[in-house]
Image (spheres, rainbow, N blue to C red):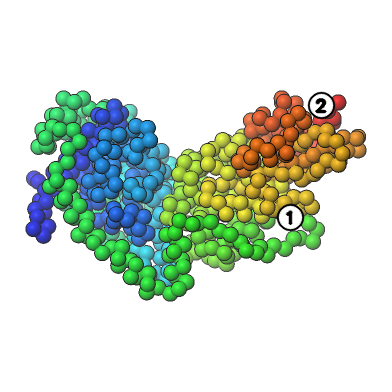
Amino acid sequence: MLAHIQNRDREINEDKIVDEIRALSIDMIREAGSGHSGIALGGASILYTLYAHHLRFDPKNPSFYNRDRFVMSSGHGSSLLYATLCMAGYPLDLEDLKKFRTLHSKTSGHPEYNLSLGVEATTGPLGEGIAMAVGMAMAGKHSRALLNNKLIDYHVYCYCGDGDLMEGVSYEAMSLAGSLNLDNLILLYDSNHVSLDGATKNVFDDNIEERVIACNFDYIEATDEIESLDKAILEARQNKKPTLIEVKTTIGKYAKDEGKNTIHGRVLEKEEITKIKKKMGLRDIPFTITNESLEGFQILIQNRNEHLVENFEKEIDALEEEEKKIVELLRGDKKTITLSDLLYETPEDKKESLRLSSFKVLNAYAKESPLLFGGCADVSASTLVRLEDTISFSKDHYEGRNIMFGVREHSMAAVANGLALSGYRPFVSTYLCFSDYLKPALRLSSLMDLPVTYIFTHDSISIGEDGPTHMPVEQIVTLRALPNMEVYRPADSNEVIGSYRSIMENMHPASILLSRNTLPILDTTSVPLVSDGAYIVRQEERDLDGIIIATGEEVSLALDVIKLLQEKGYDIRLVSMPSMERYEKLEDKKKEELLPIGIKKFVIEKSSSYSWYFFTYNDSYLFTQDVFGLSGKKEDVEKEFHFTKEEISLAIEALLK
């Protein structure tokens, strides 16, 4: 039975609009020669119903802050998303759809973050979209609380499939969302019981209803008919908990192998497309949209959202001045934070643990801007990453700025991406060794170039007794290998201050790696020069015999090494390199001044050697860590792995002779 609705003076054939979205989607895949036909045919009614009847948005003002958000977690359904956005009135035309999956097109193989096109997040790695949607829902709750429960009232919708729910990150995020009672979150689960390799009954036989109810979600079942979907979404919007709507769909609907795994990623032959369009009652002309369907779809959207932006601006005018400032910060493009004055008290003995220094500096920035919002994976007592003048974010206190993520590193990072996509400058923290748990989401931070700050402590084998499971070795080089990620490993409190200054005054993802140990605050380290990435901490006095490059607590070790070499007549320069990425941005002349060609260079860092081959002649010049650590006293572990001033100075002396 066709769905028809009367709208003003026009009868709109909704089923035909859905079928035209299907047709556009499979035409795109056919033109590209790759894509996922199964979801395009099976899930079209879900997207149509959401955009036509529920999603609050303005395609002419896509970054409007109080819009409802939609995240396509099943990113392989990108053709379905683009076809829907095109027909909904976003700046995507048929020529853009024809360029699907081609170089530099607007319609990439998986959705890539671009608000002007209506794409809220980069998705494709399954499960990530669900966790980012949770972050967006948390941001909505927090923003509303900051504004005294006024103004901000958007919902976050997320399209997900069996694959998303199989990935562990989705369970982490949903568990957190349920604990926080995020009733502004609605998951639209395309339940077709098929994955790429076969029927899900062989690998994924969970009772989804019981599972999500156990996570404190409401559960609704719907068919893929527009009327059923409409009713389910209306009910979900009224629920007092996050909701999962299980939509019973048929993968590859109308295709010859509908309902089978073989349709998942298959490109349909031209003859089959002809048959499918005939079943849907459409003309067999590629990339065809009827004016009737296009206008009907957009009329439904426009009538429902006609005064959305205008009314929001009026509500802003009615806010208090401080509330207006928060709104402008949230929806503005400038998210940099500058401290005019940092009231930092240096300890009398001029020694401090870098995690304590970080605590002081982070709190100073938090007082400067309400955009800083984040927390830890159940280790705040150890990493000291928490804000003093606030409470924990919870279902009873959405105004809190400290997020207790629980032991959920992966979803913690993905949630942070959702917060950043909602206007915040999120920070998250755990031990450096456990950065492996959150790598997929951290990679998406870098891919989207989001200003998420990752605060990692316990940064080397010098944590001692915790042993090799907690001792990072390869983690630093993996972070440095990420495009767009700036990695900072400060040597002392001065460099901690400089690292945060550089991070907060820029708009990129960044990782700051902190020693757990108490370290001397050096007289020659510099706050402003950290932004250069490298600078001279110890200048040679006469003739330059060699250069030691060091990072983190190894800078202090390097100074001790240089003293021993100086006693033997060698004059050594010490260059601290807190950020290799910032150093690479220096002009060649400045690099040459710091590290002149022809001078022997040595590296001291308790981490993988792979970061450093560019700077030295061979392995003999690297004092690094390429094997797993051991459990024992800090001093014994360092001696075991030859990180003593005596051993290193003797090795350097031999290379200088």
Q: Is the residue 507 above or below the residue 99 in the image?
A: below
Three-letter amino acid code at the position of disc 2: Leu
Q: What residue is rendered at 81% in x and 30% in y?
A: 652
Residue 432 position, x and y percent, is 60, 43
The C terminus sits in image quarter: top right
Residue 438 position, x and y percent, is 51, 43
Q: What residue is rendered at 30% in x and 67% in y?
A: 311
Mark 1: give few (<14), some (14-19) or many (20+) Cα within 10 Å: some
Residue 568 position, x and y percent, is 91, 34
Three-letter amino acid code at the position of disc 1: Glu
In the image shown, does 247 or 519 lie closer to the viewer?
519
In the image shown, does 417 or 165 lie closer to the viewer?
417
Q: Is the residue 312 above or below the residue 203 in the image?
A: below
Q: Is the residue 160 above or below the residue 402 in the image?
A: above
- Distance in Å between CA atoms under marks 1 and 2: 34 Å
- Is disc 1 in contact with disc 2, using a CB cutoff of under 8 Å? no
On the question of residue 597 being in view, the answer is yes
Compare marks 1 and 2 and give the one earlier in the sequence: 1
Q: What is the secondary structure assignment of the residue under circle 2?
A: helix
Q: What is the secondary structure assignment of the residue under circle 1?
A: strand
Question: Which residue in the structure is indicated by mark 1?
Answer: 352
On the question of residue 191 being in view, the answer is no
